[in-house]
Image (spheres, grey):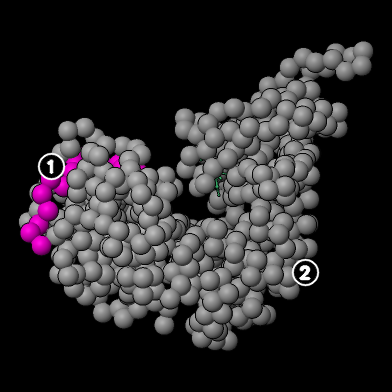
Amino acid sequence: MQEKIIILDFGSQTTQLIGRRVRELDMFCEIVPYNKFPKNDPSVIGVILSGSPYSVYDENAFKMDLSEIRGKYPILGICYGAQFMAYANGGNVEPAGTREYGRANLAKFDKENPLFKGFDENSQVWMSHGDTITALPENFKVIASTDKVTNAAYQAENEKLWGVQFHPEVFHSVQGSLLLKNFVVDICGGKQDWSAASFVETTVAELKKQLGNDRVILGLSGGVDSSVAAVLLNRAIGKNLTCIFVDHGMLRKDEFKNVLHDYECLGLNVIGVDASEKFFKELEGVTEPERKRKIIGAGFIDVFDAEAQKITDAKWLAQGTIYPDRIESLSITGMVIKSHHNVGGLPEKMNLKLCEPLQWLFKDEVRRVGRELGMPAHLIDRHPFPGPGLAVRILGDITREKVRILQEADDIFIKGLREYMVKEADGSETALYNKVWQAGVILLPIKSVGVMGDERTYERAVALRAVTSTDAMTADWAHLPYDFMAKVSNDIINKVKGVNRVCYDISSKPPATIEWE
Ligand code: XMP
């Protein structure tokens, strides 16, 4: 049985981060809404309560029945989680004089407490709270304080129940991972048995059992998630998996051919469908971004469906959905459940059951699993690429000629990123490509004057876009070396017929977005 930590989500923005930190300790964990604790699950070994946008005394604050977990599992409350447990047990929580946000130091802490094993004096922690615990319940004792916050951490006497006002999951809490390790490993007794190898082994065994001799269809996009899902399924059920890879004509230069080749080398049973003609026809003259996306989305489903119908005995549709796609998230306005279907509506339409083997993994774990499965690095380390492809990078209407220009320019930029090596502090080298989250070229809907040889030109402008990010929710423009940009600009203007000007997009997200459309 895969033992696990349950993280009860009270709606904090850092709940997912708690999950990631626990997984980094090679411990399996699940994030569940605060009021959906899985009772009677023997694999649970400990519980963490997250932060929340609410104050405990708010009328609408998220509350749970602590008797479901208290005395049954070791518990760690973080920020609101700590305040809630103190408040619910008769302590006092009040608005702090000033909202405390940022770095603080644990000026005093109980060195004997197992939660702080190995902690340094004055360890830096990250605070982000408007309320403070002004009085602890009777049988709770303070185990750490900062200059400003007396009850920065507490433990219920003779109980495995802790609360911390700071955020150990945040990078700026320097020994935050150590605190989580002390809780998860020492206190809860976690065996740290969650690894890519163990995931592959158990998942392949489960898939064999779940799918038996059934036929499964999977839509490949060329991206990391669907590719890893396919290789995993292939290991479990081999030729009973049929993959469908649709070319809508808006992929990167030679991508359809190259990726199809990669898939075949991996032993996948893939049907490649070149449907570009249909998409170019339907997109003719369309300039409105949302309409372009809709046409491509609907067209994709049509093509996929038509292919899938040919596999008459298929029972399952597999998808590369990953954990962040489906975590039930809470918002201040109430429950918001993120529903996610990569090929929306298809399972119902085709009367297929859904199989999502990566549904518990974070992105970095998907990559680890891919490596474990022996997939080539260039497939695993690929940048994210939007489903509608280059269509969202061509402003205005889409033509084959524009796609060709963009593919050529994009190819020079991406190859350049892969070839340019950056020296690391330890003397090793990393390709610039792996230093950025995502990169691409945008074709602008303008022409401008230039000069080539003795001739005046009037041609297109393109913008290079490269960003750093951890989750695409926020992003900064990548500070690419000038010599690299100079070479790429020169190569694009000299080699791509139809372009005479290259710009670099230096907008961050927000307020801009990564894609231009
Ligand atoms: P934005 O432009 O919103 O992009 O900052 C955030 C991330 O999402 C990708 N993206 C898309 N992916 N279909 C997709 O599958 C889309 O329509 C789409 N639009 C943006 C984008 O490439 C970035 O990684």
The magenta region covers 125-139
Q: Left or right: 487 with respect to 112?
A: right
Mark 1 falls on what kind of element?
strand
Q: Closer to the camera, 188 or 466?
A: 188
Instruction: Please identify the quadrant where the N terminus is shown.
Output: bottom left
At label 1, the amino acid type is Glu
* Residue that appears at 7% across and 59% down: 138
Q: How many marks?
A: 2
Where in the image, quadrant-wise, is ligand 1 located?
top right
Q: Left or right: 516 with respect to 487?
A: left
Q: Image quarter for residue 22?
A: bottom left
Mark 2 falls on what kind of element?
helix
Give percent across and percent down for residue 437. Answer: 60, 44
Find disc 2 in the rendering and name its residue: 265
Seen in the picture, residue 326 relative to 445 is either above or below; the reply is: below
Q: Image quarter for residue 457?
A: top right
Seen in the picture, residue 426 relative to 484 is either above or below; the reply is: below
Give percent across and percent down for residue 117. Answer: 35, 62
Is any atom of residue 449 visible in this view? Answer: yes
Give percent across and percent down for residue 130. Answer: 22, 39
Q: Left or right: 470 with respect to 82?
A: right
Instruction: Please identify the quadrant where the C terminus is shown.
Output: top right
Find disc 1 in the rendering and name its residue: 94
* Residue that appears at 68% across and 45% down: 424
Q: Image quarter for residue 71?
A: bottom left
Give percent across and percent down for residue 42. Answer: 31, 81
Precedes in sequence: disc 1 or disc 2: 1
